[in-house]
Amino acid sequence: MAIPTGMDKELQAALVEVVAKDNSTGLGQKLKELITSGPRQVTKGLQDWNYENRLFLYKGLVYVPDNKNVRCKIVQQFYDSIMGHPGQWKTVKLITREYWWPGITEFIKAYIKGCTTCQTTKIKPPVKVPLKPNEIPSGIWETITMDFIVDLPTSNGYDSILTVVNHHSKAIILAPCHKTITAEKTSQLLIDYVWKRTGFPLTIILDQGPQFVAQVTQELWRKLGIKQKLSTAFHPQTDGESKHINQEIEQYLRICRNFQQNDWATLLPIIEFVHNAQLHCSTHKSPFKVWYGIHPTFKPPLQLQTRLQSADECIQYLEEMHKEVTAALHLTA
Protein backbone atom coordinates (compact mmCIF):
# COMPACT_ATOMS: atom_id res chain seq x y z
CA MET A 1 0.00 0.00 0.00
CA ALA A 2 1.45 3.36 -1.03
CA ILE A 3 0.57 6.85 -2.19
CA PRO A 4 -0.60 6.78 -5.87
CA THR A 5 2.36 7.54 -8.15
CA GLY A 6 0.21 9.66 -10.44
CA MET A 7 -1.00 12.04 -7.72
CA ASP A 8 -0.65 15.70 -8.65
CA LYS A 9 1.96 17.40 -6.40
CA GLU A 10 -0.26 20.40 -5.73
CA LEU A 11 -3.13 18.11 -4.74
CA GLN A 12 -0.84 16.03 -2.51
CA ALA A 13 0.35 19.21 -0.74
CA ALA A 14 -3.27 20.28 -0.18
CA LEU A 15 -4.10 16.84 1.25
CA VAL A 16 -1.12 16.93 3.60
CA GLU A 17 -2.20 20.37 4.82
CA VAL A 18 -5.76 19.19 5.47
CA VAL A 19 -4.52 16.11 7.33
CA ALA A 20 -2.23 18.31 9.44
CA LYS A 21 -5.19 20.52 10.39
CA ASP A 22 -7.17 17.39 11.20
CA ASN A 23 -4.31 16.28 13.45
CA SER A 24 -4.36 19.62 15.24
CA THR A 25 -7.90 18.92 16.43
CA GLY A 26 -6.64 15.83 18.22
CA LEU A 27 -8.68 13.21 16.34
CA GLY A 28 -6.18 12.69 13.55
CA GLN A 29 -3.25 12.68 15.95
CA LYS A 30 -4.87 10.02 18.14
CA LEU A 31 -5.58 7.86 15.09
CA LYS A 32 -1.97 8.23 13.95
CA GLU A 33 -0.64 7.21 17.36
CA LEU A 34 -2.95 4.20 17.52
CA ILE A 35 -1.95 3.04 14.03
CA THR A 36 1.80 3.46 14.53
CA SER A 37 2.30 2.51 18.17
CA GLY A 38 -1.02 1.49 19.73
CA PRO A 39 -1.51 -1.69 21.77
CA ARG A 40 -2.16 -4.86 19.78
CA GLN A 41 -5.70 -5.36 21.09
CA VAL A 42 -6.61 -1.91 19.76
CA THR A 43 -4.71 -1.97 16.45
CA LYS A 44 -6.51 -5.20 15.46
CA GLY A 45 -9.55 -3.09 14.69
CA LEU A 46 -7.43 -0.63 12.69
CA GLN A 47 -5.62 -3.12 10.47
CA ASP A 48 -7.13 -1.54 7.33
CA TRP A 49 -5.49 1.81 8.17
CA ASN A 50 -1.93 3.00 7.48
CA TYR A 51 -0.05 6.25 7.93
CA GLU A 52 2.49 7.04 5.17
CA ASN A 53 4.10 10.26 3.94
CA ARG A 54 1.91 12.35 6.29
CA LEU A 55 -1.29 10.88 4.78
CA PHE A 56 -3.77 8.28 6.06
CA LEU A 57 -4.51 5.25 3.88
CA TYR A 58 -7.62 3.11 4.25
CA LYS A 59 -7.38 -0.29 2.54
CA GLY A 60 -4.60 1.11 0.38
CA LEU A 61 -6.64 4.17 -0.68
CA VAL A 62 -5.80 7.74 0.29
CA TYR A 63 -8.23 8.93 2.96
CA VAL A 64 -9.52 12.48 2.33
CA PRO A 65 -10.66 14.35 5.48
CA ASP A 66 -13.91 16.32 5.55
CA ASN A 67 -12.78 19.27 3.41
CA LYS A 68 -15.05 20.21 0.51
CA ASN A 69 -12.42 22.19 -1.42
CA VAL A 70 -9.91 19.31 -1.50
CA ARG A 71 -12.58 16.75 -2.35
CA CYS A 72 -13.76 18.98 -5.22
CA LYS A 73 -10.17 19.28 -6.49
CA ILE A 74 -9.93 15.50 -6.63
CA VAL A 75 -13.17 15.19 -8.62
CA GLN A 76 -12.06 18.01 -10.95
CA GLN A 77 -8.80 16.18 -11.71
CA PHE A 78 -10.68 13.10 -12.90
CA TYR A 79 -13.68 14.82 -14.47
CA ASP A 80 -13.23 18.38 -15.70
CA SER A 81 -11.43 19.91 -18.68
CA ILE A 82 -9.06 17.49 -20.40
CA MET A 83 -10.82 14.43 -18.95
CA GLY A 84 -13.87 15.09 -21.11
CA HIS A 85 -16.58 14.82 -18.40
CA PRO A 86 -16.90 10.99 -18.53
CA GLY A 87 -20.13 10.72 -16.49
CA GLN A 88 -21.02 9.44 -13.02
CA TRP A 89 -20.21 5.74 -13.23
CA LYS A 90 -16.80 6.09 -14.91
CA THR A 91 -15.77 8.99 -12.66
CA VAL A 92 -16.66 7.08 -9.49
CA LYS A 93 -14.65 4.07 -10.68
CA LEU A 94 -11.64 6.24 -11.59
CA ILE A 95 -11.54 8.11 -8.28
CA THR A 96 -12.19 5.11 -6.03
CA ARG A 97 -9.13 3.37 -7.46
CA GLU A 98 -7.02 5.81 -5.42
CA TYR A 99 -9.13 7.73 -2.89
CA TRP A 100 -11.71 7.07 -0.18
CA TRP A 101 -13.87 9.03 2.23
CA PRO A 102 -17.28 8.34 3.77
CA GLY A 103 -20.02 9.08 1.21
CA ILE A 104 -17.57 9.41 -1.69
CA THR A 105 -20.01 8.08 -4.30
CA GLU A 106 -22.79 10.49 -3.35
CA PHE A 107 -20.33 13.41 -3.26
CA ILE A 108 -19.16 12.64 -6.81
CA LYS A 109 -22.72 12.22 -8.12
CA ALA A 110 -23.79 15.54 -6.58
CA TYR A 111 -20.77 17.29 -8.13
CA ILE A 112 -21.53 15.90 -11.59
CA LYS A 113 -25.26 16.62 -11.28
CA GLY A 114 -24.41 20.30 -10.79
CA CYS A 115 -21.98 20.47 -13.75
CA THR A 116 -23.20 23.27 -16.04
CA THR A 117 -20.95 22.12 -18.91
CA CYS A 118 -22.67 18.73 -19.05
CA GLN A 119 -26.11 20.31 -18.81
CA THR A 120 -25.42 22.56 -21.80
CA THR A 121 -23.46 20.23 -24.09
CA LYS A 122 -24.48 16.62 -23.51
CA ILE A 123 -27.32 15.08 -25.49
CA LYS A 124 -28.96 11.94 -24.13
CA PRO A 125 -29.45 9.55 -27.07
CA PRO A 126 -32.64 7.50 -27.37
CA VAL A 127 -32.42 3.91 -26.16
CA LYS A 128 -32.20 1.45 -29.05
CA VAL A 129 -32.09 -2.32 -28.67
CA PRO A 130 -29.99 -4.11 -31.34
CA LEU A 131 -32.02 -6.51 -33.47
CA LYS A 132 -29.22 -9.06 -33.38
CA PRO A 133 -26.07 -8.62 -31.25
CA ASN A 134 -22.71 -9.28 -32.88
CA GLU A 135 -20.92 -12.49 -32.00
CA ILE A 136 -18.67 -12.19 -28.95
CA PRO A 137 -15.03 -12.67 -30.02
CA SER A 138 -12.89 -15.13 -28.07
CA GLY A 139 -9.67 -13.08 -28.22
CA ILE A 140 -8.44 -9.49 -28.02
CA TRP A 141 -8.28 -7.61 -31.35
CA GLU A 142 -9.84 -10.50 -33.26
CA THR A 143 -12.84 -8.32 -34.19
CA ILE A 144 -12.77 -4.57 -34.75
CA THR A 145 -15.15 -1.93 -36.06
CA MET A 146 -14.10 1.00 -38.23
CA ASP A 147 -15.82 4.29 -39.02
CA PHE A 148 -15.13 7.96 -39.78
CA ILE A 149 -15.98 11.26 -38.10
CA VAL A 150 -15.99 13.79 -40.93
CA ASP A 151 -16.42 17.52 -41.65
CA LEU A 152 -14.48 18.72 -38.60
CA PRO A 153 -12.77 22.15 -38.59
CA THR A 154 -9.34 21.83 -40.20
CA SER A 155 -6.66 20.94 -37.65
CA ASN A 156 -3.03 20.35 -38.61
CA GLY A 157 -4.27 19.90 -42.17
CA TYR A 158 -6.86 17.21 -41.28
CA ASP A 159 -10.66 17.40 -41.29
CA SER A 160 -11.70 13.86 -40.25
CA ILE A 161 -10.93 11.04 -37.80
CA LEU A 162 -10.72 7.29 -38.42
CA THR A 163 -12.07 5.46 -35.35
CA VAL A 164 -11.14 1.83 -34.70
CA VAL A 165 -12.84 -0.04 -31.84
CA ASN A 166 -11.84 -3.44 -30.49
CA HIS A 167 -15.02 -5.45 -29.94
CA HIS A 168 -13.50 -7.51 -27.10
CA SER A 169 -11.60 -5.04 -24.87
CA LYS A 170 -13.52 -1.90 -26.02
CA ALA A 171 -10.17 -0.19 -26.66
CA ILE A 172 -10.02 2.49 -29.34
CA ILE A 173 -7.37 3.69 -31.79
CA LEU A 174 -7.79 7.11 -33.44
CA ALA A 175 -6.11 8.43 -36.58
CA PRO A 176 -6.46 11.91 -38.15
CA CYS A 177 -7.26 11.83 -41.85
CA HIS A 178 -9.17 13.60 -44.66
CA LYS A 179 -12.80 13.26 -45.70
CA THR A 180 -11.67 12.47 -49.26
CA ILE A 181 -9.43 9.59 -48.14
CA THR A 182 -9.16 6.78 -50.70
CA ALA A 183 -9.50 3.04 -50.17
CA GLU A 184 -5.74 2.58 -50.54
CA LYS A 185 -4.95 5.24 -47.92
CA THR A 186 -7.56 3.76 -45.55
CA SER A 187 -5.79 0.42 -45.78
CA GLN A 188 -2.49 2.19 -45.13
CA LEU A 189 -3.95 3.82 -42.00
CA LEU A 190 -4.96 0.36 -40.79
CA ILE A 191 -1.34 -0.75 -41.16
CA ASP A 192 0.18 2.41 -39.63
CA TYR A 193 -2.11 2.71 -36.61
CA VAL A 194 -3.53 -0.79 -35.94
CA TRP A 195 -1.38 -3.55 -37.40
CA LYS A 196 1.89 -2.31 -35.85
CA ARG A 197 0.28 -2.45 -32.38
CA THR A 198 -2.12 -5.39 -32.53
CA GLY A 199 -1.59 -7.34 -35.75
CA PHE A 200 -4.41 -7.76 -38.26
CA PRO A 201 -7.88 -8.71 -36.98
CA LEU A 202 -9.85 -11.72 -38.14
CA THR A 203 -13.05 -9.72 -38.71
CA ILE A 204 -13.79 -6.06 -39.45
CA ILE A 205 -17.30 -4.62 -38.99
CA LEU A 206 -17.96 -1.60 -41.22
CA ASP A 207 -20.65 0.52 -42.80
CA GLN A 208 -21.17 0.91 -46.55
CA GLY A 209 -18.65 3.76 -46.96
CA PRO A 210 -16.85 3.92 -50.31
CA GLN A 211 -13.48 3.42 -48.64
CA PHE A 212 -14.67 0.05 -47.31
CA VAL A 213 -16.62 -1.38 -50.24
CA ALA A 214 -14.04 -0.51 -52.90
CA GLN A 215 -12.77 -3.52 -54.83
CA VAL A 216 -9.12 -2.81 -53.96
CA THR A 217 -9.93 -2.82 -50.23
CA GLN A 218 -11.93 -6.03 -50.39
CA GLU A 219 -9.21 -7.74 -52.44
CA LEU A 220 -6.45 -6.65 -50.02
CA TRP A 221 -8.33 -7.81 -46.96
CA ARG A 222 -9.27 -11.09 -48.68
CA LYS A 223 -5.58 -11.82 -49.26
CA LEU A 224 -4.83 -10.99 -45.62
CA GLY A 225 -7.55 -13.39 -44.46
CA ILE A 226 -9.71 -10.63 -42.93
CA LYS A 227 -13.47 -11.22 -42.99
CA GLN A 228 -15.71 -8.19 -43.60
CA LYS A 229 -19.15 -7.61 -42.11
CA LEU A 230 -20.97 -4.70 -43.73
CA SER A 231 -23.95 -3.02 -42.08
CA THR A 232 -27.08 -2.13 -44.06
CA ALA A 233 -29.62 0.68 -43.94
CA PHE A 234 -32.08 -1.74 -42.32
CA HIS A 235 -29.61 -3.06 -39.73
CA PRO A 236 -27.37 -0.12 -38.68
CA GLN A 237 -26.88 -1.75 -35.26
CA THR A 238 -24.25 -4.00 -36.84
CA ASP A 239 -21.81 -1.09 -36.65
CA GLY A 240 -23.42 0.50 -33.58
CA GLU A 241 -20.27 0.28 -31.45
CA SER A 242 -18.36 2.66 -33.74
CA LYS A 243 -21.32 5.05 -33.84
CA HIS A 244 -21.43 5.14 -30.04
CA ILE A 245 -17.68 5.82 -29.81
CA ASN A 246 -18.01 8.57 -32.42
CA GLN A 247 -20.65 10.28 -30.26
CA GLU A 248 -18.33 10.00 -27.24
CA ILE A 249 -15.41 11.56 -29.16
CA GLU A 250 -17.57 14.36 -30.57
CA GLN A 251 -18.84 15.08 -27.04
CA TYR A 252 -15.24 15.26 -25.78
CA LEU A 253 -14.30 17.66 -28.57
CA ARG A 254 -17.27 19.93 -27.84
CA ILE A 255 -16.05 20.32 -24.26
CA CYS A 256 -12.27 20.39 -24.64
CA ARG A 257 -11.25 21.97 -27.93
CA ASN A 258 -10.13 25.60 -28.04
CA PHE A 259 -12.06 28.71 -29.07
CA GLN A 260 -11.07 28.38 -32.75
CA GLN A 261 -11.92 24.64 -32.70
CA ASN A 262 -8.71 23.90 -34.61
CA ASP A 263 -6.69 21.95 -32.05
CA TRP A 264 -8.61 18.64 -32.06
CA ALA A 265 -5.83 16.76 -33.91
CA THR A 266 -3.43 17.39 -31.01
CA LEU A 267 -6.07 16.08 -28.57
CA LEU A 268 -6.49 12.67 -30.23
CA PRO A 269 -3.72 10.89 -28.23
CA ILE A 270 -5.28 12.20 -24.99
CA ILE A 271 -8.81 11.20 -26.03
CA GLU A 272 -7.55 7.71 -26.88
CA PHE A 273 -5.71 7.38 -23.56
CA VAL A 274 -8.61 8.73 -21.48
CA HIS A 275 -11.08 6.31 -23.08
CA ASN A 276 -8.77 3.31 -22.72
CA ALA A 277 -8.00 4.14 -19.07
CA GLN A 278 -11.67 4.33 -18.01
CA LEU A 279 -13.75 1.33 -16.95
CA HIS A 280 -16.28 0.17 -19.54
CA CYS A 281 -19.83 -0.47 -18.34
CA SER A 282 -20.15 -3.82 -20.15
CA THR A 283 -16.84 -5.37 -19.04
CA HIS A 284 -16.38 -3.50 -15.72
CA LYS A 285 -12.71 -3.25 -16.66
CA SER A 286 -10.71 -0.62 -18.50
CA PRO A 287 -9.55 -1.46 -22.05
CA PHE A 288 -5.95 -1.07 -20.82
CA LYS A 289 -6.57 -3.71 -18.14
CA VAL A 290 -8.02 -6.15 -20.69
CA TRP A 291 -5.39 -5.36 -23.31
CA TYR A 292 -2.20 -5.21 -21.21
CA GLY A 293 -3.30 -6.66 -17.86
CA ILE A 294 -2.37 -3.46 -16.00
CA HIS A 295 -3.64 0.04 -15.33
CA PRO A 296 -1.13 2.68 -16.50
CA THR A 297 -0.14 5.49 -14.16
CA PHE A 298 -3.11 7.79 -14.44
CA LYS A 299 -2.03 11.41 -14.39
CA PRO A 300 -3.83 13.57 -16.96
CA PRO A 301 -1.68 16.24 -18.64
CA LEU A 302 -3.49 19.14 -16.98
CA GLN A 303 -0.95 21.68 -18.20
CA LEU A 304 -1.44 20.81 -21.87
CA GLN A 305 -3.21 24.06 -22.66
CA THR A 306 -0.70 26.25 -20.76
CA ARG A 307 2.46 25.43 -22.68
CA LEU A 308 4.67 28.44 -23.40
CA GLN A 309 4.32 30.28 -26.68
CA SER A 310 6.66 32.70 -28.36
CA ALA A 311 5.91 36.43 -28.10
CA ASP A 312 5.00 36.61 -31.81
CA GLU A 313 2.54 33.71 -31.46
CA CYS A 314 0.92 35.34 -28.42
CA ILE A 315 0.54 38.68 -30.19
CA GLN A 316 -0.90 37.03 -33.30
CA TYR A 317 -3.34 35.02 -31.19
CA LEU A 318 -4.52 38.13 -29.31
CA GLU A 319 -4.97 40.06 -32.56
CA GLU A 320 -7.04 37.26 -34.09
CA MET A 321 -9.10 36.96 -30.92
CA HIS A 322 -9.72 40.73 -30.91
CA LYS A 323 -10.96 40.64 -34.51
CA GLU A 324 -13.26 37.66 -33.84
CA VAL A 325 -14.76 39.21 -30.70
CA THR A 326 -15.26 42.57 -32.44
CA ALA A 327 -17.02 40.87 -35.35
CA ALA A 328 -19.23 38.92 -32.96
CA LEU A 329 -20.19 42.10 -31.10
CA HIS A 330 -21.13 43.80 -34.40
CA LEU A 331 -23.36 40.86 -35.29
CA THR A 332 -25.21 41.01 -31.97
CA ALA A 333 -25.50 44.83 -31.87
Image (spheres, rainbow, N blue to C red):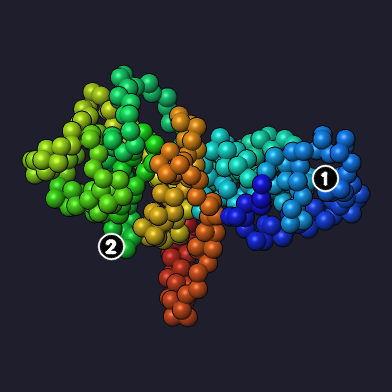
Left or right placement of residue 69 versus residue 248 in this view: right
19 sits left or right of 198 in the view: right
Image coords of residue 189 (percent x, y): 23, 51
What count of labels does the image hold? 2
Label 1, secondary structure: give it: helix
Q: Is residue 78 above or below residue 238?
A: below
What x and y, as percent, mark residue 182? Answer: 15, 50
Q: Nearer the viewer, mark 1 or mark 2?
A: 1
- Residue at point 40%, 41% (across, down): 291
Q: Would you name the residue on which mark 1 appears?
A: 35
Dot 2 amino acid type: Gly
Q: Quadrant location of residue 5?
A: bottom right
Point 43% across, 65% down: residue:
324
Q: Is residue 229 visible?
A: yes
* Image position, residue 135 (x, y; %): 30, 24
Percent position of residue 292, x then y: 42, 44
Q: Nearer the viewer, residue 281 or 267?
A: 281
Horizontal arrangement in the rendering, residue 235 relative to residue 44 (left or right): left
Q: Residues within 10 Å of mark 2 (few under 14, many from 20)?
A: few
Q: Give whichever of discs 1 and 2 has the lower sequence position.
A: 1
Q: On the image, numbered disc 2 is attached to which residue?
A: 157
Q: Residue furthest right?
A: 26
Depth check, front residue: 34 or 152 = 34
- Say which residue appears at 47% left-offset and 53% top-offset: 256
Q: Secondary structure at mark 2?
A: loop
Query: In the picture provided, is 21 more to the left or to the right than 220?
Result: right
- Pick out the residue farthest to the top: 131
Q: Residue drawn at (60%, 42%), measured in percent from left and top?
A: 97
Q: CA distance from mark 1 to mark 2?
A: 59 Å
